[in-house]
Image (cartoon, rainbow, N blue to C red):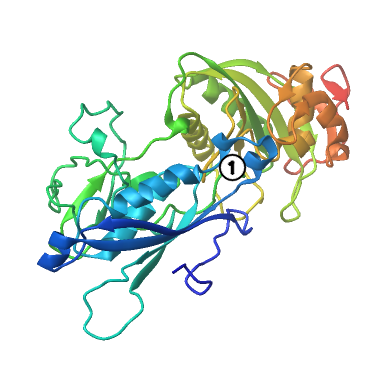
């Protein structure tokens, strides 16, 4: 009794590549789900198959369980859902399992099949199976599994969410229900966690957030708070971060100057140093004008995802639009490094997954911090990485005092390198 190839779907990452899979088949537990009284009284055996879609490369490269899913713990959670709070429908059981899996930030999609081999059917049959596919655009209509030990304990203090999402559910017995239009009292749910915010230019998906299906009039709602993971946790003290800035539309130098000022004025961010300005050829995407690029060294007391939102807000303020992958842009701010954090989620990967091969980041970074080290897969001394980066020949020059001295702009001017001490050839 396992999920067959027809019921299992491939899932793709934000670059359109097939994700890896972890499969758990035949998880079995005794439960009391069903619409009939004798099912609730006598119980029966339920079986679940789960296919988890995620990127396992970082875990494999480091041989570290911290960067993948602990399938032993997941199996226990799935069994707990099967044996847990009784519900009428195995559709609800499947949704609870899906919600439990997707509560892990590294998981991007999940397939769940719940089997009820002893269902009360009056004709001969082998099995009854409900199979679902849920991802970060189609939300589970249930809440994640919560261990019984946590029920009734003092609630953990959480920041008040800035936004909530509503979706139809079949509440568990005794669960609070918020009627449609009622004030936003959060349940112990996670709802909006699987609706990624628009990501930085290559650290998250371009395009709109997940759309929720319309809720029929009069149907009960559960209002869920944003679930948090390690990237939502503010650090105990200031953390060193590296930000990469780029622009090739409009008055690029003025925009980058303003962006540095905006970063410095953002609460929780302290700009420590700014690199020379690099003029670089575009890498990937359609044919387009040269870029101006710079690296900002800063410290922050913001959580990684809060820092991402702050940089996106600055991009938006300078007219950033996301119509074309790797297309021209008025402003790009990328989080290259956040302390020693190594993480892969749907909207943010740290360190930046392509920083080790981008000379337009590495050369300015090495100029402002010659001893810098890039951790993670493919990392190493930044200077050495800059010397071997595939696009190193596309870095034309570095201007040292670009924050105070005008240089030829990218748009409409591809002329000679300015003479004088402000220009440094690479």
Q: Is residue 420 left or right of residue 368?
A: right
What's the residue at 43%, 35% (across, down)?
A: 229
Q: Is residue 191 left or right of residue 285?
A: left
Residue 195 visible, this orientation:
no
What's the residue at 33%, 60% (across, down)?
A: 94
Q: Is residue 343 left or right of residue 226?
A: right
Residue 189 place in picture, x, y as percent: 28, 44
What's the residue at 30%, 51% (across, down)?
A: 81
Residue 388's image quarter?
top right
Residue 233's image quarter?
top left
Number of disc labels: 1
The image shows residue 261, relative to residue 281, as above or below, that is above
Name the one closer to the observer, 158 or 199: 158
Residue of label 1: 203
Residue 301 place in picture, x, y as percent: 47, 18
What's the residue at 25%, 34% (across, down)?
A: 149
Residue 294 visible, this orientation:
yes
Q: Is residue 182 left or right of residue 312?
A: left
Q: Residues within 10 Å of mark 1 (few under 14, many from 20)?
A: many
Q: Quadrant where the N terminus lies?
A: bottom left
Name the one closer to the observer, 420 or 360: 360
Residue 186's image quarter?
top left
Residue 244 place in picture, x, y as percent: 66, 31
Name the one closer to the observer, 283 or 258: 283
Of all residues, the one furthest to the bottom in this rendering is 123
Q: Quadrant where the C terminus lies?
A: top right
Provide the secondary structure element on which disc 1 rests.
loop
Residue 286 place in picture, x, y as percent: 72, 56
């Amino acid at each position: 009794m396992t999920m067959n190839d027809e019921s299992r779907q491939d899932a793709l990452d934000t670059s359109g590549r097939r994700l890896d899979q972890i499969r758990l088949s035949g998880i079995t537990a005794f439960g009391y789900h069903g619409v009939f009284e004798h099912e609730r009284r006598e119980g029966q055996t339920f079986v679940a198959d789960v296919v988890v879609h995620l990127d396992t490369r970082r875990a494999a490269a480091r041989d570290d369980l911290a960067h993948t899913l602990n399938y032993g713990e997941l199996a226990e959670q799935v069994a707990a859902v099967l044996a847990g709070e009784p519900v009428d429908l195995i559709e609800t059981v499947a949704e609870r399992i899906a919600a439990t899996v997707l509560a892990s930030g590294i998981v991007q999609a999940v397939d769940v099949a719940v089997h009820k081999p002893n269902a009360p059917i009056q004709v001969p049959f082998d099995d009854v199976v409900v199979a679902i596919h849920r991802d970060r655009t189609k939300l589970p209509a249930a809440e994640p599994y919560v261990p019984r030990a946590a029920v009734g304990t003092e609630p953990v203090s959480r920041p008040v969410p800035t936004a909530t999402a509503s979706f139809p559910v079949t509440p568990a017995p005794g669960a609070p229900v918020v009627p449609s239009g009622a004030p936003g009292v959060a349940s112990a749910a996670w709802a909006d966690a699987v609706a990624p915010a628009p990501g930085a230019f290559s650290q998250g998906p371009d395009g709109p957030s997940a759309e929720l299906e319309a809720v029929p009039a009069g149907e009960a709602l559960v209002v869920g708070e944003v679930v948090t993971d390690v990237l939502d946790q503010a650090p105990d003290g200031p953390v060193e971060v590296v930000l990469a800035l780029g622009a090739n539309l409009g008055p690029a130098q003025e925009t980058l100057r303003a962006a540095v000022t905006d970063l410095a004025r953002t609460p929780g961010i302290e700009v420590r140093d700014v690199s020379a300005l690099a003029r670089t050829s575009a890498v990937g995407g359609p044919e387009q004008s040269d870029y101006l690029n710079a690296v900002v060294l800063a410290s922050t007391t913001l959580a990684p995802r809060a820092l991402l939102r702050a940089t996106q807000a600055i991009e938006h303020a300078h007219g950033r639009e996301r119509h074309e992958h790797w297309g021209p842009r008025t402003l790009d701010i990328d989080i290259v490094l956040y302390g020693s954090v190594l993480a892969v989620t749907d909207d943010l990967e740290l360190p930046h997954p392509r920083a080790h091969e981008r000379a337009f980041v590495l050369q300015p970074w090495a100029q402002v911090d010659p001893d810098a080290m890039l951790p993670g897969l493919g990392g190493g001394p930044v200077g050495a990485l800059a010397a071997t980066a595939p696009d190193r020949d596309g870095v034309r020059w570095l201007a040292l005092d670009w924050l105070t001295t005008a240089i030829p702009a990218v748009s409409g001017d591809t002329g000679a390198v300015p003479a004088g001490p402000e220009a440094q050839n690479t």
